[in-house]
């Protein structure tokens, strides 16, 4: 009981840390790279703006917009120019703290690289269109983002008068990790090499493997079945109570409205939300993001599983409710809003300045799928949030044409265009962590020597990209050394 109370007190004093896409309304979330830990108020570069083409697929469309980027030239010797490193922006604002912190900055200092960070169109402050209406989101796609990067590289070559044989190395984590690999495939004349971290290369509508890895991670990090069994027991108890005494579940999980007022989609959203607690815990386990101080780092798979499995007379569902309260406190929410209609209304908001979930949802509905369903782990999390639940969200947000046939066709096009797991690329390093659920859609084994894979046992999403810490595992430390060696080989340095 003391452990439960200490966890609750811990999170009541924590600041809100939005390091990933943890959307508590049950929306399919992406991976998302957080801010780098270790930032201590160092001066940050001012934003710059690049005149970008709106539609790269149409030569006759001359419309342009301003795209935000950042530069760090403190390591670069213009008299003896070295490589150029480009951090690819993803499904969130570009963070200037990455220009002074992170493993890539340590590599940049080592190799005297010029560093750029280009924000992804439609995210952060890079707004190509007046609003985010469905007709305007037609210009939001990975292929347009890659073309943005190509235009940016050509322009920076001219602006900085870089030598013709300059070597551009692209870096990306999560979705940008995919973009980094695809950039090397699509624009090999502009990009010499790529470090692709935690990038899902295979688009898939029903990403059922996600929760399978979540369960495997609970086993891997604890070394036994106790935690998994407690989660399984808790969900079974919740299901039974929902039929007989739903008011008990309402109280334990601090829901915003009674289940008697809930629709079928609301209930699905509720189950998706409490499963997301574990998804978020596992995906970012023990990383070194901004906010990952001693208090935050104490909330790991091991400590939460200890909370759930400690000997007491408290039933499993109550312990799971306590964990849910921790996650609510973490995001400064007084109650769990599982309303499907509230979620849809928020995602229908087309104005700039609100949450960026609409943009990523559009990309999942038109390119990737990535819907983290319950289909593979029915015994653990139930089977309330199947793929149909997410397809319906696409239709309710963007229109009826976004049905299963549309999604399947979109995913097929993406895999055919980029190659999926059959991608053929040279000088790309694919990096994944065994605890990160997104590795299920990436390359974890080396297929060719010129495109090696580094699979880090025990690490989570994008772990190798964050600043090194004394607490890092030997495997994570070794992975950073291997990446450094590949970079040294590419840029011709010892």
Image (cartoon, rainbow, N blue to C red):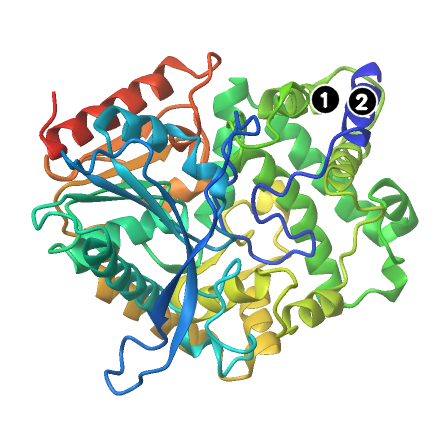
Left/right of residue 74 with respect to residue 301 in the rendered view: left
Would residue 119 appear left or right of 232 to someone viewing this image? Answer: left
Q: Where 1 sits versus 20, above or below?
A: above
Report the front residue among 59 and 135. 59
Q: Position of residue 162 (x, y in %)?
A: 16, 48
Residue named by callout 2: 4
Q: Secondary structure at mark 2?
A: helix
Indicate the position of residue 399 as horizontal and vertical percent values.
55, 82
Name the image quarter holding the N terminus.
top right
Disc 1 residue crowd, few under 14, some 14–19, many 20+, Cα 10 Å: many
Residue drawn where x is 88% and y is 65% of the image: 261
Mark 2: give few (<14), some (14-19) or many (20+) Cα within 10 Å: some
Badge 1 is on which residue?
307
- The residue under the point 82% across, 64% down is 262
Q: Are marks 2 and 1 in contact (CB under 8 Å)?
A: yes
Determine whether the residue tagged by mark 1 lies in a helix, strand or loop. helix
The CA span between labels 2 and 1 is: 6 Å
In the displayed structure image, the side of residue 159 where residue 240 appears, left or right = right
């Amino acid at each position: 009981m003391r452990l439960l109370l200490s966890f609750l007190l811990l999170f009541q004093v924590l600041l809100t840390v939005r390091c990933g896409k943890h959307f508590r309304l049950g929306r399919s979330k992406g991976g998302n790279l957080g801010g780098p830990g270790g930032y201590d108020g160092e001066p940050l570069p001012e934003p710059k703006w690049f005149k970008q083409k709106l539609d790269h697929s149409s030569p006759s469309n001359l419309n342009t917009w301003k795209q935000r980027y950042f530069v760090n030239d403190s390591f670069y010797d213009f008299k003896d120019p070295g490589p150029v490193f480009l951090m690819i922006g993803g499904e969130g604002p570009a963070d200037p703290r990455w220009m002074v912190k992170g493993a890539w900055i340590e590599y940049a200092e080592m190799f005297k690289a010029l560093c750029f960070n280009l924000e992804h169109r439609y995210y952060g402050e890079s707004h190509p269109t007046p609003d985010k209406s469905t007709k305007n989101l037609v210009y939001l796609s990975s292929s347009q983002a890659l073309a943005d990067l190509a235009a940016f590289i050509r322009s920076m070559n001219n602006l900085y008068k870089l030598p013709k044989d300059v070597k551009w190395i692209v870096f990306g984590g999560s979705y940008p990790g995919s973009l980094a690999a695809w950039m090397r495939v699509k624009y090999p004349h502009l990009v010499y090499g790529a470090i692709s971290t935690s990038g899902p290369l295979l688009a898939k509508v029903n990403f059922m493997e996600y929760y399978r890895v979540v369960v495997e991670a609970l086993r891997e990090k604890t070394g036994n079945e106790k935690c998994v069994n407690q989660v399984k027991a808790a969900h079974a108890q919740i299901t039974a109570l929902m039929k007989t005494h739903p008011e008990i579940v309402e109280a334990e999980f601090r829901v915003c409205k009674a289940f008697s007022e809930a629709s079928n989609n609301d209930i699905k959203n509720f189950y998706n939300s409490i499963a997301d607690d574990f998804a978020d815990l596992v995906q970012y386990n023990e990383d070194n993001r901004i906010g990952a101080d001693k208090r935050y780092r104490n909330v790991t798979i091991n400590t939460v599983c200890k909370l759930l499995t400690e000997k007491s007379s408290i039933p499993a569902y109550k312990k799971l409710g306590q964990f849910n309260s921790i996650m609510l406190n973490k995001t400064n929410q007084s109650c769990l809003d599982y309303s499907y209609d509230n979620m849809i209304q928020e995602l229908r908001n087309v104005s700039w300045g609100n949450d960026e979930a609409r943009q990523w949802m559009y990309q999942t509905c038109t390119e990737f799928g990535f819907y983290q369903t319950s289909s593979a782990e029915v015994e653990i999390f139930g089977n309330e949030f199947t793929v149909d639940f997410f397809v319906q969200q696409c239709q309710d947000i963007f229109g009826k044409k976004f049905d299963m046939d549309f999604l399947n066709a979109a995913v097929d096009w993406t895999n055919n265009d980029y190659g999926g797991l059959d991608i053929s690329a040279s000088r790309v390093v694919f990096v994944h962590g065994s605890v990160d659920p997104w590795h299920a859609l990436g390359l974890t084994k080396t297929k060719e020597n010129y495109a090696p894979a580094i699979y880090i046992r025990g690490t989570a999403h994008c772990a190798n990209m964050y600043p090194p810490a004394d607490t890092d595992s030997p495997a994570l430390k070794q992975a950073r050394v291997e990446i450094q060696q590949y970079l040294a080989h590419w840029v011709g340095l010892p």
